[in-house]
Image (cartoon, grey):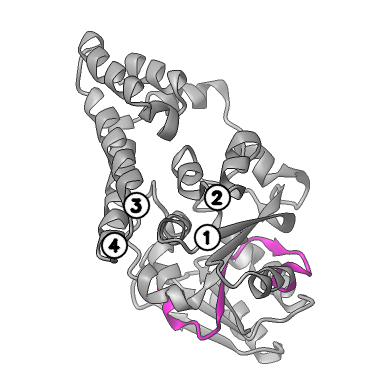
């Protein structure tokens, strides 16, 4: 079973060497490292070229002629990978030595599995740890139980993401199903892959071990461990909620359309989540008293409980525009 590492790089010189060294220190080396660089303007390419000269595995570096953004940069890297298992790789983390070996063992022992993801250790810019990823994002209790007991799509759609790309790998035989990735800021490339594969019956496995140091810093595209002040929480509560809900609905509709083209696959759950997000988006232009019928209808249907945070989300929808 051959392993490909798909890295998306962009102005990553500050932390890139440490990540590359962690890949080179794996107990099971990858069969290739494919790097797509998104028009970096720092020393990223020099670092990659230097690393490739001494690496014990092929390093293939592709420089984009124009900036694609991180999701489409990852999509390009997926397209170029030649291995049986593709590992997403961010440029600023550190992989613990057994990451590739342990994930490959899970795939080898579970032939019906489409993807595997692990927990991670959250660290600051100087690699000081401050907790686990799963604990921080609340992937535990009922939600974790729902996922591991087979209700994967329900668990994924029922709140914020918990399948993070830097902790994830998937079988490359699903490349034609996955690509093109029609992501939005609310449905990113990793959510796209996990929702799509779980929805078509190629289940995922949550590997309950922290296999990488997930660095949190101000320059990263997406983070998980940054703490918000009370002022920031208030700002986020009053942000353009309509665009957030519509962005999620748009991404999920693209997934629903992709799956609908396959014979015998039920998209009812996805379509219900889309309807809920669109209903929540529609509230933002209404006066509070005019929102009540829509909110009560969503509560009565059970969609607030299945796809949001139940009464807590309904209360926010009543108060905030």
Mark toward the start of the polypeptide (1 vs 4): 1
Foreground tag (1 vs 4): 1
Instruction: Give the residue pinned by disc 4.
Output: 258
In reply to whether residue 84 is colored magenta, the answer given is yes
- Count residues near mark 3 (Cα–Cα under 10 Å), then give few for <14, some for 14-19, many for 20+: some
* Circle 3 SS class: loop
Q: Quadrant of residue 30?
A: bottom right
Q: Residue at x 44, y 23 (%)?
A: 310
Instruction: Give the residue pinned by disc 3.
Output: 184
Residue 90 image point, x, y percent: 58, 64
Instruction: Give the residue pinned by disc 1.
Output: 203
Instruction: Give the residue pinned by disc 2.
Output: 150
Does 73 appear above or below 182?
below
Q: Quadrant of residue 49?
A: bottom right
State yes or no: discs 3 and 4 in contact (Cβ < 8 Å). no
Range of the magenta residues? 76-101
Residue 114 image point, x, y percent: 52, 67
Instruction: Calculate the distance from the C-alpha at mark 1 to the C-alpha at mark 4.
Output: 17 Å
Instruction: Calculate the distance from the C-alpha at mark 3 to the C-alpha at mark 1.
Output: 23 Å
In reply to whether residue 173 is colored magenta, the answer given is no
Foreground tag (2 vs 3): 2
Q: Is residue 253 left or right of residue 115?
A: left
């Amino acid at each position: 079973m051959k392993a490909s590492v798909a890295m998306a790089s962009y102005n990553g010189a500050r932390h890139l060497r440490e990540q590359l060294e962690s890949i080179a220190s794996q107990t099971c080396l990858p069969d290739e490292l494919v790097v797509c660089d998104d028009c970096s303007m720092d020393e990223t390419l020099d670092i990659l070229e230097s690393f490739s000269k001494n690496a014990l595995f092929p390093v293939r570096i592709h420089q984009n002629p124009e900036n694609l953004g991180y999701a489409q940069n990852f999509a390009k890297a997926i397209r170029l990978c030649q291995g049986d298992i593709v590992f997403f790789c961010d440029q600023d983390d550190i992989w613990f030595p057994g990451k590739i070996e342990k994930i490959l063992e899970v795939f080898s022992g579970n032939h019906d599995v489409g993807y595997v993801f692990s927990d991670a250790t959250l660290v600051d810019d100087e690699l000081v740890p401050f907790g686990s990823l799963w604990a921080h994002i609340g992937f535990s209790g009922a939600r974790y139980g729902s996922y591991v007991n087979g209700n994967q799509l329900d668990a994924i759609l029922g709140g914020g993401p918990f399948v993070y790309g830097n902790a994830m790998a998937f079988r490359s035989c699903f490349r034609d199903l996955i690509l093109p990735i029609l992501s939005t800021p609310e449905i990113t490339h990793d959510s796209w892959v996990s929702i799509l594969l779980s929805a078509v019956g190629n289940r995922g496995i949550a590997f309950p071990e922290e296999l990488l140091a997930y660095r949190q810093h101000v320059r990263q595209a997406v983070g998980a461990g940054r703490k918000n002040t009370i002022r920031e929480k208030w700002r986020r509560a009053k942000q353009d909620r309509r665009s957030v809900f519509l962005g999620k609905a748009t991404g999920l509709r693209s997934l629903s359309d992709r799956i609908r083209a396959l014979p015998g696959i039920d998209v009812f759950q996805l379509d219900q989540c889309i309807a809920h997000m669109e209903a929540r988006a529609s509230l933002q232009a209404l006066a509070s008293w005019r929102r009540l019928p829509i909110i009560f209808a969503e509560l009565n249907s059970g969609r607030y409980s299945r796809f949001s945070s139940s009464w807590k989300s309904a209360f926010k929808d009543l108060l905030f525009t």
